[in-house]
Image (cartoon, helix red, strand yellow):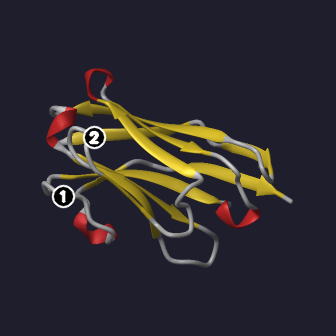
Amino acid sequence: QVQLEESGGGLVQAGGSLRLSCAASGRTFSSYAMGWFRQAPGKEREFVTAISRIGLRTYYADSVKGRFAISRDNPKNTMYLQMNGLKPEDTAVYYCAATSRPTPGVGFDEYNYWGQGTQVTVSS
């Protein structure tokens, strides 16, 4: 089992940047592929990006490709989401998630563990 805690959310103007962190504790962090999802008010939780267990492969939703970058530091048990060029439509609660599957997927039901989320608000 792994526990996840997000941090780094906040309020930023359109065009600005934020870096989210996801700190993991419990079982060996490198045993899990990881992902970021987000949920805006009144909308379903959607896939943002994911990274394989040792970080060799990354996956992005089309809506964030070229603006967001996922990374992980296994010795520090931490995953990051660098968000640049933020838009008002990026406003949401951002969740990190872990999956025991060898390849991370885009469906939220493929992930076993979730953090509590961190709010990102982008003003226009």
Residue shown at 65% from the left, 61% from the top: 90
Answer whether labels 2 and 1 touch (C-beta < 8 Å).
no
Tell me which amino acid carries mark 2. Gly
Residue 40 picture location, percent across and down:
61, 68
Asked which secondary structure carries label 1, the reply is loop
Residue 77 appears at what percent x and percent y? 30, 28
Lateral position of residue 53 relative to residue 14, left or right:
left
Q: CA distance from mark 2 to mark 1?
A: 11 Å
Q: What residue is drawn where x is 59% and y is 53%?
A: 67
Residue that appears at 70% across and 51% down: 85
- Residue 55's label in the rendered image is 2
The mark that comes first in sequence, 2 or 1, is 2
Q: Residues within 10 Å of mark 1 (few under 14, many from 20)?
A: some
Which is nearer the eye, 60 or 115? 60
Left or right of 116: which side holds 93?
right
- Report the number of discs: 2
Q: Secondary structure at mark 2?
A: loop
Locate residue 91 relative to residue 69 in the image: left or right. Answer: right
Single out the residue that lies furthest toward the right. 124
Residue 112 position in % (x across, y down): 23, 57
Q: Is residue 68 above or below residue 54?
A: below
Placement of 54 over or under 89, stated as above or below: above
Residue occupied by mark 1: 103
* Kind of residue indicated by mark 1: Thr
Residue 11 appears in which quarter of the rendering?
top right
- Work out whether residue 67 or residue 106 is closer to the camera in this orientation and state it: 67
Relative to 111, 101 lies left or right: left
Q: List x then y, in percent, for residue 37.
A: 45, 60
- Kindly give the residue lying farthest to the front in the view shown: 66
Q: Give 39 or 80, whichever is nearer the viewer.
A: 80
